[in-house]
Amino acid sequence: MSSRRNLPPGFIVPSAPELRDRPPSGPGWIHEIKYDGWRLIAKRDSEHVRLWSRPAQDWTARFRRIAAAVASLPAGSVTLDGEAVAAGADGLPDFHALRSQEGQLGAVLVAFDVLQLDGRDLRDLALEERRAALGGLLKPAPDGIVMSEAIEGEGETVFRHACALGLEGIVSKRLGSRYRSGPTDNWRKVRCPAYERK
């Protein structure tokens, strides 16, 4: 990761979920599928779009479909957090496809958070408020962006289903939590033991 002093203007260091052996149990959490892709911070100021990787590398040219989708959003300015994902022949995420130009051009952004919208910093809002804002922004969603589904219920049950489907795992997020850059206990990821990258 680049030092914070060398970060490009407008880049927000993404929140990093803690790796756990088991998902949290009980109420107060939502669970999202963990897609095997590349983390992106997508920022638009007027018509100017930038897509950054986790270490703040400019990947706008790699993901032109995603960049065009961000440019088309009905907002003057916006910053999204999400994952660039390419689908394989079986419809599941194919990480290695992202290494090819074809995979990058066809990739979509699975958006799971909105950090800024029309000049307003949303990071101090509760998770569910940010997701509501993201859902409103993505109705209808442009080609190249989909919203990550939030699944309520027991974490272990959601995790078992994700593993049975051949997915990488899940990320559990604490309801009411604010967005914070870097490692956070409010986001917890659990990987399926049998998962193997294609």
Image (tube, rainbow, N blue to C red):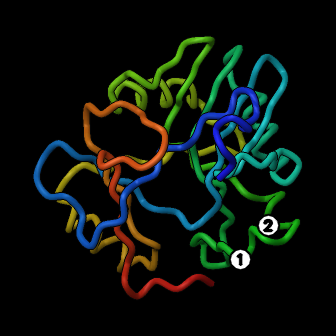
Q: Quadrant of residue 45?
A: top right
Residue occupying image coordinates x 88% and y 66%: 101
Helix, strand or loop at disc 1?
Answer: helix
Q: In the drawing, what numbered circle is on residue 96?
A: 1
Q: In the drawing, what numbered circle is on residue 139?
A: none
| Residue 118: % across, % down | 62, 13
Residue at numbered disc 2: 103
- Residue type of the residue flagged with mark 1: His
Residue 14, compared with residue 80, is above or below; it is: below
Residue occupying image coordinates x 62% and y 11%: 119
* In front of the other: 97 or 180: 180
| Residue 21: % across, % down | 27, 73
| Residue 134: % across, % down | 50, 29
Residue 149, compared with residue 97, is above or below; it is: above
Residue 53, compared with residue 42, is above or below; it is: below
Q: Give the residue furthest to the left.
A: 26
| Among the two numbered marks 1 and 2 on one chain, the one whose residue lies closer to the N terminus | 1
Q: Relative to 90, is 135 on the left or the right?
A: left
Q: Quadrant of residue 198?
A: bottom right
Mark 1 and 2 residues: CB-CB less than 8 Å, in contact? yes
Helix, strand or loop at disc 2?
Answer: helix
Residue occupying image coordinates x 73% and y 33%: 70
| Residue 30: % across, % down | 28, 47
